[in-house]
Amino acid sequence: MSIAKSARARKRQLGQFLTPPALAAQLVATLELTVHDRVLEPSMGNGAFILPLITRFMALYTGSAATRLAQVLQRNVYGVELDATLYAQCLDNIRRRWGELPAQHNLMQGDFFRHHFLAPHGAVGALTFTHIVGNPPFGGTLDPALQDELDRVYGFRNGAKIKKETYAFFIVKSLDLLADGGRLRFICSDTFLTINTMRGLRRYLMEQGEVAIRTLDQFSDETNHPMVVLDFTKTGPTAAITVDGVRTVRQQIELTANFSWRIAADLARYFAGPRLGDYMIASSGMTVGKNAYFVRKIEDNTIREPYAFEFFDDPITLEKELSRARLGKLSARQIEKTRRLEAIGATQRAVRVVARPAPLTLSLPHPDYCYYNKGIPAIVYAPPTHVIYWKDDGEAVLTFKRNGNWYLRGVGGQPYFKREGLTWQLIARRLYPRYLPPGYILDSGAPCAFLRPGVAHDELFFILGWTLTRLCNRLLKEVINHTKNIQSKDFERLPYPWWVAGQERRTAINSVSAMVAAARQGACFTLDSPEIAALERCYTMPEPENGDGCIPGLP
């Protein structure tokens, strides 16, 4: 996790988006509970789930309210909460509701990942639960002291990687604690339904039991992020899932490279052939670290340069290296090496950014600058909007990165700098693909794709035309990655239009090639342009002979 993420406001850092009591009560109301059940809420907050659980269980016992409350909190209801303030609020809410809190109960303040649930009365093994419910934190920061250990414990299941994300690890640990036949019901971010980094979690869930997903129309005023209810029953491997009442078989899910849970029956046939990644290799670009130092906006074919760049020898010290290291830690070997270098007065080449007395105005093109590929919501082609200082093959930029924090040192996309290809805006509701001429340095906000060796040049225009269509964007945003973040590998996972051949293929290539040429002369195309509508017809897949839209051999 980055230092910036760890330093966020506490609420966001903990991934806290509290469940409205009415929603929590609704989710608890349909659980089938008996006096023999144990229910865990692993992130109980101020008690939104705990209070209706207590109410449900108390109705199963007889005796005074105090007696029944004690029985429930000692036998049936368990909870953990990291935030001490929310934990205290939960206990206060119980006291206000029932007038007291039993001296002994199973509501604990602490880190769910640090807590071990021991079987009662000296029984061997860990405690298991018939139900686990709640709203695990998402987008939160895992305890830096535990990150690597948690990754070792929860980061892999059955050979698949589980993303180092709070709610993903909550789900994995909860499945470990769930009894056979037990039920997990969590409110989750909807991100885990399609994105590739959650593929391992999706596979693990299907290997462990039955999955049903329901989209929430409204979660809370604290976030507008789309949320879902994950309903899981631990029954062993399953061959299908249900999302919003629609059942999807594993055979269709497996057709998608990202094991997507949003593959619809009418879309599965497009994934029966090659992928765009078979023809193009996609890459992210470079994070400069401080754009204001090196990146300049083009205005009337000129730029204003406020800085000069000076190289110097910077002494190597352990203090500096620790300040730049991941989580402020270095291995014993790195520490020893750095100490030896510091002891002999070793230095490393560094760059100093010096403000000029007055900015220079420079005309473009200029030998010290290259066009910089910033992400913009334009299609087909767009003239450059920025340049980057790139004298001596970017020596100043690359030196600045090498001496920066650990997460800045890599140079994303460097093998593809200055190559011809396609590009798009990273953060967008749909793909905005456009032609990328040779000569550009790549920015991380605009991923790119380049023809693989041996692939004919015409494929560049054929694929550009495909990515402009509504169908391609439906496949991207419904199946591959429904979030606004369109990564380079999402592009590679898109189906290649293998069903387009003959005259339709030649028409598409010629049309896109002409559009790019016109755009480079000043023409502007939008998604409503008639030329784009014509492309839709070129890439339409003929209906299968059986007329049911299915791939032979699939249900």
Image (tube, rainbow, N blue to C red):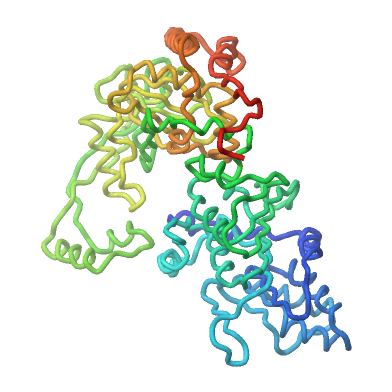
Res 315 quadrant in image: bottom left
Instruction: Give the residue at x 40% y 33%.
Output: 277
Please state the horizontal and vertical placement of residue 360, each as a whole percent of the image: 32, 24
Can you say whether 207 is above or below 310 in the image? below
**74 on left or right of 433:** right
Instruction: Give the residue at x 17% y 49%.
Output: 313
Q: Residue furthest left?
A: 344
Can residue 519 be seen by looking at this rendering? no
Instruction: Give the residue at x 63% y 79%.
Output: 108
Can residue 452 be seen by looking at this rendering? yes
**322 on left or right of 299:** left
| Quadrant, the C terminus | top right
Please state the horizontal and vertical placement of residue 405, each as a whole percent of the image: 34, 52
Res 462 quadrant in image: top left
Res 369 quadrant in image: top left
- In the image shown, does 276 or 550 lie closer to the viewer? 550
**226 on left or right of 122:** right
- In the image shown, does 414 or 174 lie closer to the viewer? 174
Please state the horizontal and vertical placement of residue 28, each as a whole percent of the image: 77, 65
